[in-house]
Image (cartoon, rainbow, N blue to C red):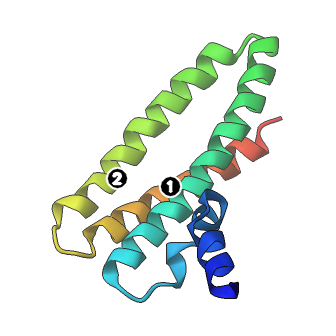
Amino acid sequence: MMRILALLAALSPAAAAAQSRCSGQTQIDANFCAQEKWQLADDELNRLWKQKKALADARGTGAALLAEQRSWLRQRDAACKPELAAGGSAAPMFYWACMEEETQARNQVLRSLR
């Protein structure tokens, strides 16, 4: 009976979402782990963006902030794209690590905006 309960708990969507690939030992796990870390940084970016864009709009500087954000997105993508072009099984890990690093840096910039 306990095995069945454990199996059901492991198969639940909440349990699946809670299990991170970062504890794995394969290259595929490392690739997914890097993507998960970027996703957390990107979620924070989106949260910060909503706050800072609303403040900038209220000050009349929203269009400038939007142009800056679009420019940053192009720069981030250009900086990280070569990581995928290098090929190999670790290329996705390096790509997502780059994306996370760039996004964390942008998050710092957005946090500093008053």
* Residue denoted by label 1: 102
**Image quarter of residue 77:** top left
Lateral position of residue 55 relative to residue 76, left or right: right
Q: Quadrant of residue 41?
A: bottom right
Calculate the distance from the C-alpha at mark 1 to the C-alpha at mark 2: 9 Å
Q: Which residue is mark 2?
A: 79
Judge left or right: residue 61 versus residue 19. right
Q: Position of residue 114 (x, y in %)?
A: 83, 35
Q: Can see residue 28? A: yes
Name the amino acid, label 1.
Glu
As rendered, which of 71 and 47 lies closer to the eye?
Answer: 47
- Disc 1 secondary structure class: helix
Task: Give the quadrant of residue 65.
Answer: top right
Residue 12 image position (x, y, % from top left): 61, 62
Which residue appears at 41% of the width and 77% of the height? Answer: 30
* Residue 66 at x, y percent in the picture: 57, 22
> What residue is shown at x 81% (from left), y 14% (from top)?
59
Above or below, 30 against 18 in this view is below
Is disc 2 placed on a helix, strand or loop?
A: helix
Vertical comparison of 42 with 8: above or below = above
User: As drawn, is 52 to the left or to the right of 14?
Assistant: right
* Residue at 78%, 31% in the rendered image: 51
